[in-house]
Image (tube, coloured by chain):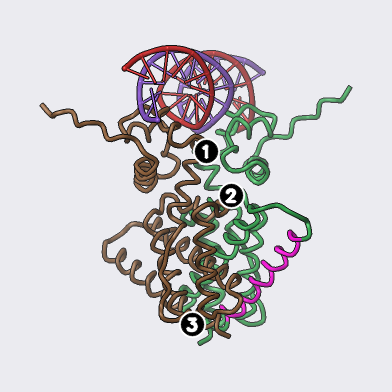
Chain colours: A green, B brown, C red, D purple
DNA sequence: ACCTGAACACCGTTCAAGT
DNA sequence: ACCTGAACACCGTTCAAGT
């Protein structure tokens, strides 16, 4: 007979992790407060204690989670810019289930901070018109990931083509990234 | 006393138009079958006669509507490529309410045809590796529109800054488009 | 402070029935 | 062929109540 584990207390972090898991594995439309409660072994209403604005707050938190990034300055603004783009891409790729939110919700909270940090870091490193550059970089990352994830929802034939598609996405991204950086230094 | 108009018969097209109007004006989350029925002066259940797979079919149709584009070949592959990108951008910008669907749903039906046409047209016009180029173009369009629409949901201060943001988005797009085309011809 | 239970208004979808 | 009405299972959220 399995012993009943002491109940882990609910927290904003645990809620978000469980929500990401549901969205990534079953899709955003199947992420409901009730199912989320089930996954956390708690009544749905308990969630409201940690996210007072309910599902809207949850959606905001999920978008923020895959969209707020922290990166250390590199040896040049070129390297720093690449690091930001790669980090942004990875964060989005990790949770395709909430990509629609990430690409669509206006930046808030930690995401706004992330954008500001990126802009300041690049400006300090000597990149002119850093704010414009950051917008261009965000567009590049968003577009790359959108096309890549969209394509991964196409046919599902063999593992072989799967990995080939993965490698192509990486190559596309790095090639585009180089071109983007070159374009910025004019 | 207003005369009762003869009821316009329901159709797939009228349903999609009404749905786009609701999504753009009130947001995707407020687009429900029942509200859609109200807008069409019909019971929600009548919609199922025209869209047998119900709300899923509606979402697919909306994504397709803003994502399937038709463009005539220009005088060079460069001009043709630009025309495709501009047309794709306009279609997405026209209906920000369903942008999340458009960027996220795997291409189907008319959208797949649109991608195939674009690829063939550019290959015929002499662009090498047309399929890769089309993926790059789609990523560029997706990213540009995502960032632009996301930003339009930020602060809402003055009409002055509004139009300035609009013009900047246009300038950003055209600048990026030129760079993209140049990158393709290497 | 944290969670539950019952309740309410709303949702997508089915199915038999109307015309 | 096209639409309705009633019904069902499910949803987000409130609120009073428990501990």
Q: Position of residue A154 (x, y in %)?
A: 63, 53
Residue B152 in the image: above or below residue A31:
below
Q: Position of residue A56 (x, y in %)?
A: 49, 41
Between C8 and B69, the one nearer to me in the picture: B69
Work out whether disc 2 and disc 3 sit on a shared chain.
yes
Q: Residue A161: x, y in percent? A: 74, 61
Residue A13 is left or right of residue B79, and the answer is right
The quarter of the picture where residue A23 lies is: top right
Q: Chain of mark 2?
A: A
Crowding near pointer 3: few (<14 within 10 Å), some, many (20+)?
Answer: some
Task: Identify which residue, B78 or A48, lies in the foreground.
Answer: B78
Residue beneath label 3, please? Answer: A128
Residue A177 lies, with reference to residue B25, above or below; the image says below
Span of residues in magenta: A161-181
To which residue does mark 2 refer? A98
Q: Which residue is mark 1?
A: A55
Q: With B151 as the anchor, is A111 left or right in this view?
A: right
């Amino acid at each position: 007979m399995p012993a009943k584990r002491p109940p882990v207390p609910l927290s904003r972090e645990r809620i978000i992790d469980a929500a990401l898991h549901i969205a990534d594995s079953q899709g955003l439309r199947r992420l409901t407060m009730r199912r989320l409660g089930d996954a956390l072994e708690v009544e749905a209403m308990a969630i409201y204690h940690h996210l007072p604005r309910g599902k809207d707050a949850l959606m905001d938190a999920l978008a923020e989670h895959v969209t707020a990034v922290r990166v250390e300055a590199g040896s040049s603004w070129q390297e720093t810019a690449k690091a930001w783009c790669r980090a942004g891409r990875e964060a989005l790729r990790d949770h395709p289930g909430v990509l629609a939110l990430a690409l669509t919700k206006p930046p808030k909270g930690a995401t706004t901070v992330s954008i500001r940090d990126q802009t300041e870091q690049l400006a300090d490193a000597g990149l002119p018109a850093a704010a414009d550059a950051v917008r261009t970089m965000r567009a590049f990352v968003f577009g790359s990931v959108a096309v890549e994830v969209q394509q991964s929802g196409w046919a599902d034939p063999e593992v072989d083509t799967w990995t080939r598609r993965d490698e192509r996405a990486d190559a596309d991204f790095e090639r585009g990234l180089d071109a983007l950086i070159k374009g910025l230094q004019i």
